[in-house]
Image (spheres, rainbow, N blue to C red):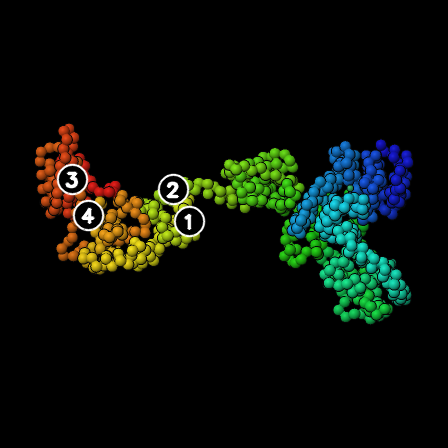
Amino acid sequence: MSTIVLNSSVDIPLPDWLKKCITHSKTSNGNAESDRRFNDANLICRAFEFAYQLHQGQYRKSGEPYICHPVAVAGLLYDLGGSPAMIAAGFLHDVVEDTDITIEQIGELFGAEVRQLVEGVTKLSKINFKSKTESQAENFRRMFLAMAQDIRVIVVKLADRLHNMRTLQVMPDEKRRRIAQETRDIFAPLANRLGIWHFKWELEDLSFKYLEPDAFRQIQQHVSEKRTSREEKLAKATATLRDRLQQASIKCLDISGRPKHLYSIYQKMQRQQKEFHEIYDLAALRIIVETNEECYRALAIVHDAFRPIPGRFKDYIGLPKPNRYQSLHTGVIGLTGRPLEVQIRTMEMHHIAEYGIAAHWKYKETGNSNNSHLSTTDEKFTWLRQLLEWQSDLKDAQEYLDSVKDNLFEDDVYVFTPKGDVIPLSPGSTSIDFAYHIHTEVGNHCAGAKVNGRMVPLSTRLQNGDIVEIMTQKNSHPSLDWLNFVRTSAAKYRIKQWYKRSRREENVARGRELLEKELGKTGFDSLLKSDAMQSVAEKCNYHSVEDLLAGLGYGEITLNLVLNRWREVVKAQQPLAVVQPFLPKESAAANKALRDAPATSRASDSPIVGVEGLVYHLAGCCTPIPGEPIIGVVTRGKGISIHRQGCHNLECVEYERLVPVGWNPAAEHSSRPHTYPVNIQIEALDRVGVLKDILSRLSDQGINVRYAQVKTAIGQPALMDLGIDIRDRPQLEQVFVQIKKMSDILNIRRIGQIDE
Ligand code: MN
C-alpha cells in the first residue's frame, strides 16, 4: 500500500513535522538532515498511512476523523524526542483495539520493536482502573511499571492520555470526571516519576479543570487578570538582566517569565491556607545559558542587579535533586519591591527538567536509529536505575528503598480482583496464593479459578494484569497437593493450619488417651470439664481443654509439660481443697459435722493423708489398700469416702467432689499394722477339699479370712468368694502368687467396682 494515501489527498491538516517527514521519505536519497529520525522517515510514513487507512470512516466523539488522535499522539512523541519506532507506535497504538488488524500483522509489517510497543500499549489500555485509595493508586502505578517492561510503552500511553485529556470536553460529565480522576491518580504521578514534567503539569491542570471546575476557573481568571501588570514588571526586569548579561558577554539563550501551572498554585493555596494574592512567586524568571560556568556568572549578575533575599539561594547544579534536576535557584527583591524568583540553567538541564527520562533521547547519540533505546539489557538497566533515582516524590528513605525493591521488574506480580482492586503477589504465585491473600476462608474453600474469564488449573502461575476470580464451595477444602505449587508463605502456613485443624477429632482423641493413661480413668470426664483443667490449658497457651488435647495429640505440646502444669495447678489448689471447693453448699454445717464426728483422723497417725480433720471411710465397692492409688469423694453426710482410682462408682462423680488423697507412708510402720478388708474370687476345679486347701494356705501366711462362700454347679468350675484382711498391696500380690501356685486353681481375681 506504500504511498497510496500520500499521493491521494489526505482530508486532515497534517502537522509540519509529518509533512517534512513525508517529503523526506519521497526524496530519501541522501540529503543531510539535522534530525536523524528522518533517516527512518519511511517507517514513520508507513505507520501513518497504515493507521490512516484503517481508521478511515471512524470518527471521534467530537466529530473529527479518528486519525487526528493517533496523529496528535505521534506528534507529542515526536516533540518529546521519541525514536521512529515510538512515533510509529503512536500512529498505530489504537489499531489493534479498534480495527481487525492483529498484533502479529503489526509485527510482520513494522518489525518486532513497533509490535512490542503497540502490544504493550494495547495491554495497558485494557486495564480498567477503579482505584479508590491512595495505596491502590500506588499499586496501579507499580503494576504499570512492572507490566510495561519497556518504559517507552508508558511514555506512549502518557501521550495517548494527554491527547485524550486535551479533547475530554466532548465527553459526558460522568465519564470526564472518571477519566480526570484516573489521570490525577495514575498518569500524572507516572509522568512525574519519569520526570516528564512537561506532561505532568498539563495532565494535572486538565484533571484539575474537570475535577474542580469552579476552583480552576477562579484561579485561571486571577492569573489572567494579573498577567498584564505582572508581565510588564517582568519585562522590565528581563530587559535589565538581558543588558547586564550581554555586557558580561554571557550568551543568553533564553530569558523569560516562567509560567506556573494552575494546579500547583491551587495546591500551594490549599497547603499554605493562603489566598491567591498571597502566593507571590507567580513572578518568576528563567535564564538559560550555554555552560555550567555561565550559570554561576549569571547568578552573580542577578545578585548584583537586584538585592538577594537571604536563604533563598539553592545550588541544584552542585547538588542535583534525586531526579537529576539541575538548576540554580535564587530569590531577589524585584523592581516593584516584591520577591522575584529566578532560575538559571543550561539548555540540557532545562530539557531534563521539562522532559525527564525523555530528555535522554534528545541527547543520546544514535548513529543508527533502528538500534533504538532500551534494545539491550544494559540499557534497560540504565533506564531502570534512572527511574529509581527519579523517584523524588516518595516520602522518605525507607519508602524509597521499598520502592526500589518493588519496582525491580521481576519482583512482584500484580493481578486484579474481579472488582478491580490490584493485588501484589510474589512472582510465580498461583490462584491459591491469590485466594489466601483475599481471605483465609476463600483459600480454604477454593474449588476452582478463572483467570481472565477462563477456567485454569489451580497451579497456573499468574501474570501481571490477570483478572483472577476464585470459585468457592462450602464443602471444598485444601488439598495437600497445593503445598507443591503455592508460592507465598502465608498460603503454605494456612494450608498446614487447615490440615492441623481438620484432623482435630483424631488429635483430640489421641491427646485424651495419653492424658487418661497418666491421670487415671476415674472421674476423668469431669476432670476435663473442671476449672483446674481449664487453667492447665491456659497455662499451656490454649484457649480450651479441647485445644489442649488436640495439641497434645498433634504433638505440639508434650505430655510431660501438661503433667507439670497439672501438678502446679493441683498444688495451688490443695490448701483450699479441704475447706472450700470440695464441700457441698451447706458447707459450714457440714464442715462442723465432719469435724465433730468421732472417727476423725489425726495428722501423723492417720493412714490417709489429705483428709486431715475430716471423717472418712474406705469405700466398700473397691476396697482400697495401701500401695494403691486412691482418691477421696465428698459424700453427703458421710464424710469422705476413699476409693481406688479407677473405681466405676466414681465415673459419675462431679470433679468438684473429688479430694486428692494418698496413703500415709508413716502409718505403715506403726507397731500394730492396720489391715483392710479385700474381697477376692477364686475359680477352681470342683474337687473335694479345694476350699480347705486354700484356707489353710491363707492361714499359713497369717491372713485372716472373714468369710467364705462357695458356689458350685455340675460340670462347672467352683466359684469361691472370700473376704480377707490385707495389710497392703504387696501382701495381696503375694497371696495371689501363692494361691495361683496351687493345683486345680483356674483363676483368681479381686472383686470390686474396678477392672483389675
Ligand atoms: Mn488512543
- Residue in the picture at 62% in, 45% down: 423
Relative to 306, does residue 546 appear above or below in the rendering? above
The image quadrant of residue 280 is: bottom right
Residue under numbered circle 2: 509
Q: Earlier in the sequence, mark 1 or mark 2?
A: 2
- Secondary-structure class at tag 1: loop
- Secondary-structure class at tag 4: helix
Quadrant position of the N terminus in the picture:
top right
- Is there any visible trace of residue 518 in the rendered image? no
- Residue in the picture at 85% in, 60% down: 225
Q: Is mark 4 within 8 Å of ligand 1?
A: no
Relative to 303, does residue 124 appear above or below in the rendering? above
Q: Mark 1 vs mark 4: give the one in front.
A: 1
Residue under numbered circle 3: 721
- Secondary-structure class at tag 2: helix
Looking at numbered disc 1 in the image, what kind of residue is underneath it? Ser
Contact (Cβ within 8 Å) of mark 3 with mark 2: no
- Residue in the picture at 43% in, 52% down: 541
Q: Earlier in the sequence, mark 1 or mark 3?
A: 1
Q: Earlier in the sequence, mark 2 or mark 4?
A: 2
Q: Earlier in the sequence, mark 3 or mark 2?
A: 2
Residue under numbered circle 4: 730
